[in-house]
Amino acid sequence: MLKKLITCLLPWSLRRRALNRWFGYRIAPTARIGMAWIFPDMLVMDEHSYIDHLTVAINLSRVELGAHATIGRGNWITGFPINTNSAHFRHQTNRQPSLSLGESAAITKNHHIDCTDQIRIGRFSTIAGYQTQLLTHSIDVFENRQNSAPIHIGDYTFVGTNSVVLGGATLPDRSVLGAKSLLNKEYHEEWMLYAGVPAKPVQGIPSSARYFTRAEGFVV
């Protein structure tokens, strides 16, 4: 704990070197972390990736950001560690408490990301707005135990503000999840708007929509 506190107080150029040397992380020279508490077992940040101020990421096996991927301010990212003496999730031997963002993917600010199991966010995708919850675990009322399942957010997707995505859900490539929606299952049809509680296919998206073919993650 003391080493972590000391690391957080260092100027970024020294902090990056300390994180790589003391914790075995792989943070590229052009990547950057603001005043945030980011201490998974393994952290990989590719060129020009960024984690903003006041974000917390703990109890995770791995966090990985592709080139130009960003995690915004004030996000709460937690998991449930493996190799503990806890009875929780003991039946899930292949569980992976991890978060990965593809190239130019973005999580904006003030979201809750529960990575008890793996969450993958694809290339050029956006978790937009505020207060979206990605929740990979809940109570299995039939077995009377905690259970988890991964979440997959595809490439070139857009998740609207204040949505909920539950474990086992898949948002396919080049699709949109409407604001305040609940995604609780796998979908596979691309070029589609999904919306509602629970979310269902609502209408197709024309292939001319430029968000889905952009070469830069930043949207002006």
Image: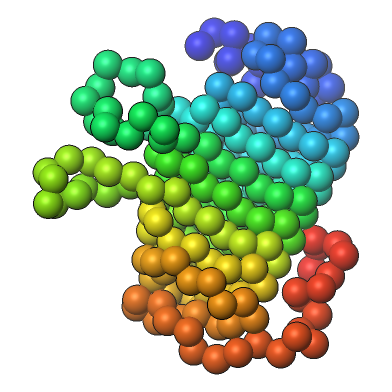
Q: Where is residue 158? Give x, y as percent.
A: 62, 70
In-image side of 22 versus 176 (left or right) = right
Whether residue 10 is visible to the viewer of this picture, yes or no, is no
Tell me residue 19's x, y (percent).
Answer: 70, 17
The quarter of the picture where the C terminus appears is bottom right
| Relative horizontal placement of residue 147, taking residue 115 as reference (left or right) | left
> How many numbered circles does the render carry?
0
Q: Residue at x 79, y 68 (%)?
A: 219
Quick check: can you spot residue 6? yes
Please tell me in which quadrant of the rendered image residue 59 appears. top left
Quick one: 88 or 36, which is closer to the camera?
88
**Residue occupying the point 58% across, 68% down:** 172
State the image coordinates of residue 26 (x, y, percent, origin top left): 75, 24
Position of residue 51 in the picture relative to residue 127 (left or right): right
Vertical order, 123 against 101 (above or below)? below
Question: Image point 21% across, 25% down: which residue?
Answer: 87
Please, is residue 128 above or below residue 112 in the view? Answer: below
Location of residue 86 in the rendering, given as x and y in whole percent from the top left corner: 25, 22
Residue in the foreground of this view, choosing between 6 and 132: 132
